[in-house]
Amino acid sequence: MIDKINELKNYFQKSSYVVFFGGAGVSTESGIPDFRSTGGLFNARYKYPPEVILSYSFFKAQTSEFYRFYRDRMVYLDAKPNTAHTALAQMEKQGKLKAVITQNIDGLHHAAGSKNVIELHGCMLRNFCMSCNKFYSLEFILQTEDIPLCSCGGIIKPDVVLYEEGLDETAIMKAVNHIADADMLIIGGTSLSVYPAAGMVNYYMGDKLVIINKSKTHVDRRADVTIHGSIGEVLTAVLAEGDVAYE
Ligand code: ZN
């Protein structure tokens, strides 16, 4: 493990265009569970699995039930950026990290101070009226009951990509361009099983592909360094001066 982290530090020092691609595992250290891996928890109180409730057709057909689940299970208002978020913000400040590409919708990278964040699945801090496009905060969603309605009477929808919905093409293009330009690509906290993460990695042309994840991923064998550990601890160690005494 120490050897791997020192190799990562070496990579980082030699790189000038680092890109981070992250998934749910980045936010679990802030206490936000990965709903895909906690499916069992939902069964008692919801008739449908989260993948069904968080789909566009369910949102349209059973908006009230969608919001019951959403307020209850998706919103973690007290969640704070963890050491992974702050290390990435620091790397950007140093000028090396050019972009954070995330599948998370919690806005914690911005909260940590990162500027160039590409939110592939949107962000729950933004909500818009489906009729007039007026903006509403997450607090507004939480203060309302049942279906949150705009002053115009329209239904408010979180600016997040639901199942069945396509990703924003501008965001995809930006992400792909950063990955193609990167001399170091760090993938963290994602099993890369969810579209479009797996395909995007194919745009990386460099020789410093790093994977940091608690469990194995199907691209581990393609990686130049794979670390199965805490993203926050690993990234913090990469930023630390001198050699690492990390276990
Ligand atoms: Zn409206």
Image (spheres, rainbow, N blue to C red):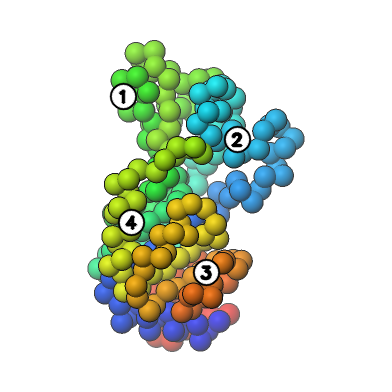
Q: Specify whether tag 1 is near ligand 1 (CB below 8 Å).
A: yes
The residue wearing badge 4 is: 175
In the displayed image of the protein, which residue is found farthest to the right?
44
- In the rendered structure, the answer to whether residue 159 lies left or right of residue 95 reads right
Q: Is there any visible trace of residue 215 in the rendered image?
A: yes
Q: Going by the image, does 92 lie left or right of 190?
A: left
Q: Which class describes the residues within 10 Å of circle 4: few (<14), some (14-19), or many (20+)?
A: many
Question: Residue beneath label 2, please?
Answer: 52
The quadrant of the rendering that contains the N terminus is bottom right
Q: Position of residue 81 (x, y in %)?
A: 44, 54
Give the quadrant of residue 99.
bottom left
Give percent across and percent down for residue 102: 41, 54
Nearest to N terminus: mark 2 or mark 3: 2
Residue 230 in view: no
- Residue 134 is tagged as 1
Label 4 to label 3: alpha-carbon separation: 18 Å
Name the front one of labels 4 and 1: 4
Under circle 2, the secondary element is helix
Instruction: Name the residue type under label 3.
Output: Val
Whichever of labels 4 and 1 marks the residue nearer the N terminus, that label is 1
N-terminal label among 4 and 3: 4
